Amino acid sequence: MPALPSFLIEPLWVQFCALLPPPPAHPLIGHRPRVADRVVFDKLIQVLVFGAAYARIADRTCSATTLRRRRDEWMQLAVAIRLEWRVRDAYDRMIGLQLGDLSVDGCITMAPCGGELGGPSPVDRAKQGMKISTVVDAQGIPLGNVLASANTHDSPLLAPTLDTLERGWLPEHVTVHLDRGYDSDLTRERLTLRGFHGEIARKGPHPTPRHRVNQRWVVERTNAWHNAFKKLAWCTERRRAVAAFYVALANAVIILRRLIREAWIRYRWEGRPRRRP
């Protein structure tokens, strides 16, 4: 069973391949040939989607050691982050980002191996976990992420999460929608310093107005999209850089899927899926 349908994996690979440098020439004659980048790319996508160990994904075409080594090479080149930028830029050109209303929230996932991001989870009997703080536009397109341990409160992550945004993108008036976990004077001060208006759910027994909930649910949906990738829902990586690599790769898949879904209504092209993705 393929990890992703062909209408997703093929355009993703074309953009990914364009970011790779030419393969190095081996100085020796008769050496074992280098594993093709496409083979490694497909298997890393399988690791992301299925969350399986490298040894279980590896076969005679590519070993687990090769997967880790090539992953580290691509991490040093920031290929996944640049791929995410490219896909988001394509979405902005073809569909358009809705940056007037932003939503921020954190999502706690499991990190059973601990490491740089591991921390006691407040929602899972203090088991090891990590938190992904995400900012999205009005349609739930991920714009930036910050990774932290699970026991980090959402409020301190707000400023670094908003700082992942490129200021040139944003319109003059931006409203940031937050849940009641961010309800504090310090949060409002941080938003004011950045020129943002905050719509924050109030703490207390009074229910949040329905129109505010409707603006904020998109970030919850994006968190669910992240958790559909089992590598993020059950992250066994101990290094922050590796987890960030997979988050950026997942963001690229999410944005591309939304791009194709929205473009399916607006455009016609060769190889267009028969049904709306």
Image (cartoon, rainbow, N blue to C red):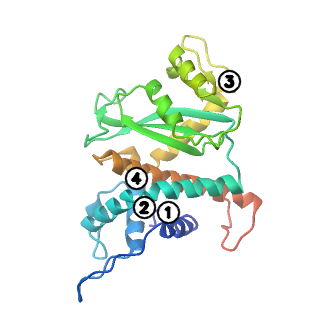
Give the Cα distance between marks 1 and 3. Answer: 36 Å
Task: Answer left or right for 81 relative to 177.
Answer: left
Crowd class of label 2 (few under 14; some 14 to 19; many from 20; radius 10 Å): many
Mark 4 vs mark 1, CA separation in Å:
18 Å
Q: Quadrant of residue 41?
A: bottom left
Which circle, 4 or 1, is nearer the viewer?
4
CA distance for labels 2 and 3: 38 Å
Assign a secondary structure to mark 2.
helix
The local secondary structure at tag 1 comes to loop
Residue carrying label 4 = 245
Report how far apart the C-alphas of labels 3 and 4 lie in the structure.
36 Å
Badge nearest the viewer, 3 or 4:
4
**Residues marked 2 and 3 touching at CB (< 8 Å):** no
Q: Does label 4 or label 1 sit earlier along the sequence?
A: 1
Mark 3 lies on residue: 210
Residue 50: give x, y in percent of width and height.
39, 56
Identified by mark 2, the residue type is Ile
Name which residue lies at 28% across and 33% down: 127
Determine which residue is flagged by label 2. 45
Which quarter of the rendered picture does the N terminus lie within?
Answer: bottom left
Mark 2 and mark 3 lie on one chain; the one further toward the N terminus is 2
Q: Secondary structure at mark 3?
A: helix
> What residue does disc 1 label?
4
